[in-house]
Amino acid sequence: MRIVLITPYGAEQRGGNWHTAARWTGFLREAGYEVEVSTEWNGAPADLMIALHARRSCKSIHAFAERHPSRPLIVVLTGTDLYRDIQSDPDAQTSLDLAHRLVVLQGRGIDELKPEHAAKTRVIYQSSPDNPHQPQFSGPFRVLVVGHLREEKDPFRAALASAYLPEHSRTQIIHLGRALSEEMARTARLAESKLPRYHWLGELTHEAVLEHFSRADLLVVSSVMEGGANVICEALAADVPVLASAVSGNIGMLGDDYPGYYPLEDERRLAQLISKAENDPAFYAELVRQGRNRRTLMTPQREASSVRQLVGEFEARAAQ
């Protein structure tokens, strides 16, 4: 079976969509499928299309459906799809209608869909390989923020929280990610100059990011909207607990009862949780314990099996 996998961002962007596309391509090729990855479908022969992002990939989705209406079309929904675009954007809404199967990347994503769309939806958690943790028994309490600097990520919330930490705190905020505008870059540089605990390292290779995870004490995910943050998978794979904004996409990843949520855009509460994680061993241990429980949903073996089953549904149907 020939599969075309559409992702709106190429490898040079180093974003979450690209990493998802790369993993899924590997899983499918290992299972014997022929997979071509592209940012836009050029009309090349394909038996099945997988498209990441209902709105950004709409041109390819609509063209494939028009030329091959009976061939399987799978659309993977991102955070901006679920929590913004499908509410108002006609192209994204049409993509939902055209898809034979929809995929959401965390358990609460399906709640955002109309019944007719939810009925054809599968939940597939993303994953990251085990990343042995290298605990640092001295030095700073390392808090990571990982992601490109854009409004949807509320990227400076941890930086703002650092101003409310106790004077004796050993916390250092380490922010990894590229500024997607000059305004974001200026804000990051200003934050560094005003907030001594905040350090913006810019864009690093994925290997370097994983190395930071292996030595981190905590991850902050401050997103306004999130489809299923792969950085959460990477943190849990390194046994690094997470503090997250209490938005649907983060709750869908970490579970309803996870104790590490703070109200969206509330840097004072985030500072309290960072301080508690640094100074309360029982609280930190509970974050780790619950993270390990959720990690079982996010292993490469489980994701690979789910992706192959997704494609296999249509192979089995064609063989009947």
Image (cartoon, rainbow, N blue to C red):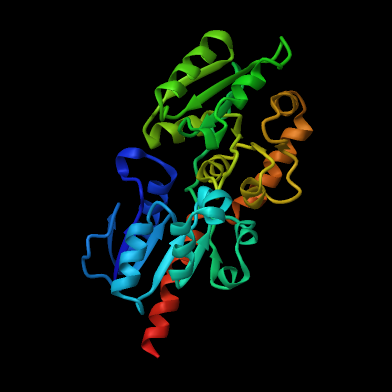
Residue 219 appears anywhere in the view: yes
- Asked if residue 298 shows in the view, the reply is no
Is 251 rendered above or below residue 59? above
Task: Reply above or below: 43 against 290.
Answer: below
Q: Is residue 29 left or right of residue 261?
A: left
Residue 152's place in the image compared with 63, above or below, is above
**Does 257 sit above or below residue 159?**
below
The residue depicted at 77 percent of the width and 27 percent of the height is: 280
Q: Position of residue 293 (x, y in %)?
A: 67, 51
What residue is drawn where x is 44% and y is 63%? 95
Write down the quadrant of residue 204 in the picture.
Answer: top left
Residue 66, picture quadrant: bottom left
How many numbered discs, if any? 0
Q: Position of residue 65 (x, y in %)?
A: 35, 71
Q: Is residue 129 left or right of residue 166?
A: left
At horizontal 45% and vertical 73% (from top left) the residue drawn is 100
Picture coordinates of residue 38, whole percent (x, y): 28, 54
Q: Is residue 102 left or right of residue 27?
A: right
Q: Residue at x 42, y 48 (%)?
A: 17
Q: Name the quarter where the C terminus is drawn.
A: bottom left
Quarter holding residue 289: top right
Q: Quadrant of the N terminus?
A: bottom left
- The extreme bottom residue here reads 320
| x and y, in percent, of residue 151 in the image | 52, 33
